[in-house]
Every structure is written in C-alpha cells, then in structure tokens.
Image (spheres, grey):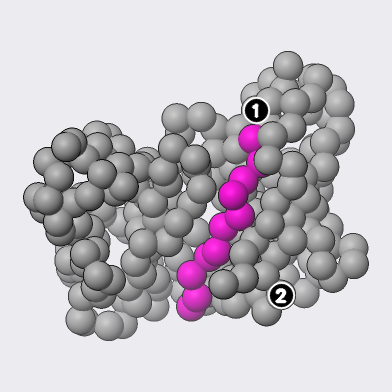
Amino acid sequence: EPEVTQTPSHQVTQMGQEVILRCVPISNHLYFYWYRQILGQKVEFLVSFYNNEISEKSEIFDDQFSVERPDGSNFTLKIRSTKLEDSAMYFCAGDRGYNSPLHFGNGTRLTVT
Amino acid sequence: AQTVTQSQPEMSVQEAETVTLSCTYDTSENNYYLFWYKQPPSRQMILVIRQEAYKQQNATENRFSVNFQKAAKSFSLKISDSQLGDTAMYFCALKGGETSGSRLTFGEGTQLTVNP
C-alpha cells in the first residue's frame, strides 16, 4: 500500500535557524497538508495545498512558515526562523478531496533548542 | 467554525472486554465526514474508521464500530474484544463539506490503555 514518506524523522535545530521538513505524498493524492502536534496536545491544522498553491491556512501559519511543491513530487514546509515554541511533531498528509480520508506520514519530530 | 470534543482524557479496559470512546462535534455543514484515528506511542497517525454523514448506517471495521447520532452530533467508537495492541491515543476528527474546506479538525484525544 502506498505511503506518505517524511524526512527526517527527527530534526534538532537552534533557535533562529531555518528548517525544511520534507514529504513525499502518495502519487494520486490531490490535496496536501501540514499539521503539527505539540507534545501532549491535539493535532492542529497548519496549511492545505492544492493545484500548486495554498488553499487554506490557519492562524498558526504566519509569515515564518512557507510551503512549496517545486518538482511535483516533494512537498516541503519551511520555518524561516525557528522559535522554542515551534518544537512539535509535524505531520504531512494527503488525500483526494474532501470526501476522502487523510493519509498521514510518520511525522518529523522538530526540537528547537 | 467546526469543533470536536472528546470529554474522556483517559480510559482503561481489560483485555477482551469492550470499551466505548465518546466524541461530540459541531458543524454547520450538511455533508461532512467523521473519522477516528489511532496514535500509538510511535506517534504515527493511523486511520481506524470513517463515517459519511449522509449515511444512516453505522460504519464497522472488524472489531471497531461507531454509533453515529447525527441529530445529537455524537460519534462514539466501540472497540470489541480489546487487545493489548489497541493501547494508544484515539482522536476523533471532522472533515467539513465543500464550504468548510478540506481541513481536518481534531478533538483533544482519549488515551486508551488495555490491561492484561
């Protein structure tokens, strides 16, 4: 069964540094998402991406965040200048539309020190 | 705005017994989708079961079934014959219809522990 693949599984970075989290979605998916989960808290929506542009974003997704899918394969989340509160598990997900379930990757654990 | 509420932060059950996890939600959509996801200690998000709001019949998936009460906006998960591998955090989630976009709104989660 096809899977959503995320790399790296764990990323440690210093406050103020830029990080790029990478995802390879399932090939027949049309919508792509990033969610985050701060330890012990619920999963929060960050952004959705469709047809090579952002279709929806949450209040969390401020100017420090950006997404792109440059080569039609990889889907990346960039955090420009990381803060301590960005430490969380970041999940990439994809689906074929609102009437289909999300398939999640295994997540990238980001630790900002 | 859509909301999902899980009022049971923790639950436990004996192996082989049945347990029900509660979930209530709020949405203004007529067509929407409800899901239960399981998150084991590895923190992977695994789809357990889904329910389309336009279907009256409750979804079942092997030992997992739901009790979907649309008027009450309730969506509980029943796990029969609980197994040790069912120990995980369970999240109820709502996906809105066409006017609400395709984002998934999660509840706070219920930590289920299956005891031997």
Image point (45%, 65%), residue name: B95
Q: Is residue B61 left or right of residue A31?
A: left
What range is drawn magenta here? A99-109
Q: Observer-nearest residue: A102 or A56?
A: A102
The image quarter in which residue B79 lies: bottom left
Q: Position of residue A108 (x, y in %)?
A: 66, 41
Out of B3 and A37, give the one closest to the viewer: A37
Q: In what element is the residue under mark 2?
A: loop
Q: Circle 1 marks a residue in which chain?
A: A
Q: Which residue is mark 2?
A: A27
Residue pushed farthest front?
B116
Name the residue tied to disc 1: A87
Most foreground residue, A35 or B39: B39
* Residue type for callout 2: Ser
Q: In percent of the image, x 28 and y 71: which residue is there? A: B61
Whether residue A69 sits left or right of residue B60 in the image: it is right
